[in-house]
Image: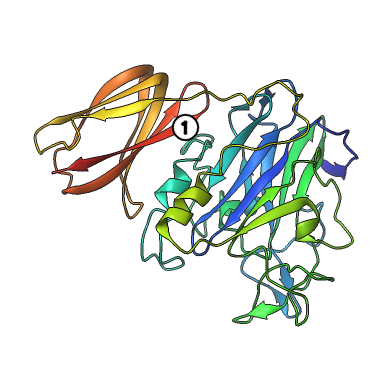
Amino acid sequence: MTQVSTVKAQCSDLFFSKYLSDGSSNKAFEIYNPTAAPIVLNGNYYVARYKTPTTSGNTSGPVPSTISTPADGDTLWLKGTIQPYSTFVVANPEVTPNSSNFGAVCDPRIRAKAVQPNGMLGNVYGTYGSSVGDPTYFKGSDVLTIEKKVGGSIVIVDLFGRQGDYMAASNSKPSAWSTIAPYTGGAGMGTWITKGYLMGRKQTIKQGVTANPSAFNPLLEYDTIAKPHTPADTTALYNRLGSHTCDCRPAGVQEYTKSIISTVYPNPVVEGGKLTVTSSELIRSYTIMSVTGAIVKEEELVQAKNNFNISVDQMPKGVYFVALRHSNGLSSLTRFIKN
């Protein structure tokens, strides 16, 4: 299969709408559908990570020599449908604290925003060092692309970064793109902007970057929000995931979202009791996470339903999040206390 890059008409195909690199495993990216029709992802689109080369060779793992040679272990096939003028969030799946490579889990508030279903099309989220899912472990200096199958070819529909840049090093590893030309993070090149920030595509951007740019100026197409300093700031930052404003959407046409009301009862719940989960939208799966982000229980329902019961026996006392994934492709989050 050959790979080509083509120039796309505005508002005609997917592009990255947000990029979150908030330290450790707190990473995610958001994809936007700027068209008036649903876009089916299944077997058609994937995200690839192109690891940054160094003057001495490479960082960890394979490094493609050109943008047209993806590393097979760094691709993530997407599954589902993105509704018109709506988003699709993929989050880092790290749920094992103190692992050999990452000492912290991905914040459950980020994972709750994720649409990409865990366990479908293989272990699509993957784990660090696995053969699939690695794009979610991107560094601030890695290139990310959205690519799709078109007949016998692969077409790049959007690209974040610039393949081939030799980045300024931190701890002997490439670090991040910066704010002043030539943007590769060296002395006098401003602030490292692709590490420790949430980056949102500007409202005026109507299409992706389909070929490797001559230079990657992060502020040309993205607005940035610095790493938050308080818990309230952090929650507000993560809540920006899952919604995007774009000039592709005609005036008067709303984003394909609706308010989802989800509740749990009783709250607090005690040992021996059952937690009743109720939602205004049909629920197809749920994940219970501790405040540290560890997955306590998860289940794909045999049949989507608006309410069901969960046993909390053997769960330690504490605060938990319940992330619900709905039949309409949206997600919601609620919390409860176990006494």
**Residue at figure coordinates x 85%, y 55% from the top left:** 212
Q: Decide if residue 71 is in sight here.
A: no
* Quarter of the figure that contains the N terminus: top right
**Residue at figure coordinates x 72%, y 78% from the top left:** 168
Colour scheme of this structure image?
rainbow
**Residue at figure coordinates x 81%, y 37% from the top left:** 206
Residue 256 spot, x, y in % from top left: 61, 24
* Quarter of the figure that contains the C terminus: top left
Residue 53 spot, x, y in % from top left: 73, 70
Front-lying residue, 243 or 146: 243
The answer to whether residue 230 is left or right of residue 197 is left
Residue 133 spot, x, y in % from top left: 56, 49
Q: In terms of secondary structure, where does tag 1 sit?
A: strand
Q: Decide if residue 255 is in sight here.
A: yes
Q: Quadrant of residue 298?
A: top left
Q: What residue type is labelled 1?
A: Ser
Residue 147 spot, x, y in % from top left: 74, 41
Residue designated by label 1 = 331
Question: Is residue 123 shown above or below 67?
Answer: above
Question: Is residue 59 shown above or below 39?
Answer: below
**Residue at figure coordinates x 42%, y 19% from the top left:** 281
The answer to whether residue 129 is left or right of residue 285 is right
The answer to whether residue 257 is left or right of residue 309 is right
